[in-house]
Amino acid sequence: MSDSQQKTIETYQKLVNASALMQTFAIGRRLGVFYLLVQGQKSVSEMANALGLVERPLELFLDQLVETGYIERYGEDYAISVLGKMLPDELADLGDRYYSRMESWLRTGDRIEDPETPFDDSDFGREKRAFEWMTTPNALEMLQILNIGQSRKGMKVVELSCGSAVMSSAFGYHDPEMKVCLVDNSENLARARETAESIGIAERCQFIEADPTVVDFQFKADLIVLSCQLCRFDDVALKSLLKNAAGQLQKSGEIVIVDEFSETPEARFSNRNAALLTEFRSPLGRQRDRKQVTDLLYACGFVDALYSDLRSAPGTRGVLVAGVSKV
């Protein structure tokens, strides 16, 4: 069998498997399987009795659902997984509520959100907030990449559009000499404060309620962080943010941008999907690849941009670190 034939078979099997997982997941939601398991782990017999189903088909069905990662099996019992516990119920439809409107977007080009809707008030923005905890592995990897607490120590760090401030809080926790400034709206700053207080760094944090594209820090920063926020901005707003940031860095300062632009083969589908859904669902934003972001950085006064893929979960992100022009 030729390589092309082998690839054709493998591609078809991947499509079949993906379809099977989506179909069984949707059926499981309709039957109430996940809601039942949230109440505690149960055997097939207990679930069949509670849901009015037949045991043998249900067992086969549950074993396939285990492959989604949403439930787990322990001997004769099934239980909701950590993912199932952490995923808000409104996101558990895996996008049915907006994919049903994609055909209209493809025909008209009109996004499903009003362009005047603030990002955080959009369904897309709320979903992004729900998954901010997924930044934690990236933050831990960034500690090593940036050598926080060693070659980069005692800095003044600003995180723009900080959300719950996972990235800068990890930096501040690792370096007890670091000062952290968090910039966002009042609702997100409340979440950032909770994060900072939970790890004991709040007294070293400054919280600024402001538009990140025009905010005035009133000091020169050593490091500016933008973590998974590019999807918020159209090109005009992002250029404003980057130019403003460049003007408020020390001469030796740097900007760090972590986002969905990993260049590994494994991340290709996820990043193409992110690009599609960002322009479909966000009010104004769009996804940008490494080259596009690098070009924007250079156009806004930054120099010497260095890129690296992040290998930590979810495996779709990369990091750009750039200095500021001394001219």
Image: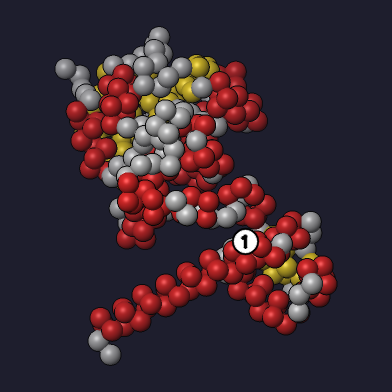
Query: Residue 59: image x %, image y %?
Result: 70, 77
Residue 62 found in image quarter: bottom right
Residue 258 versus residue 38 in the image, above or below:
above
Query: x, y (%) of residue 134?
Result: 52, 46
Q: Nearer the viewer, residue 167 or 119?
A: 119
Tag 1: amino acid: Tyr
Name the residue carrying label 1. Answer: 70
- Give the colour scheme shown: secondary structure
> In the orientation shown, which residue stands out farthest toward the left?
327
Mark 1 Cα-neighbour bin, 10 Å: few <14, some 14–19, many ≥20:
some
| As drawn, 140 above or below 13 | above
Image quarter hosting the N terminus: bottom left
Residue positioned 62% across, 67% down in the render: 27
Please provide percent x and percent y for residue 99: 46, 54
Relative side of 151 to 120, left or right: left
User: Which residue sits furthest top?
Assistant: 218
Position in image of residue 284 (x %, y %): 36, 34
Q: Along the line of sight, which residue is nearer the eye, 77 or 231?
A: 231
The residue at 55%/68% (across/down) is 23
In the image, taking residue 65 as reference, residue 223 lies left or right, namely: left
**Does 23 appear above or below 94?**
below
Q: Is residue 150 above or below residue 24?
A: above
Where residue 157 sits, quadrant-wise, is top left
Q: Where on the picture, by quarter, is residue 76?
A: bottom right
- Is residue 170 visible in the rendered image? The answer is no
Disc 1 is placed on an element classified as: loop
Q: Identify which residue is drawn at 31% across, 19% down.
A: 244
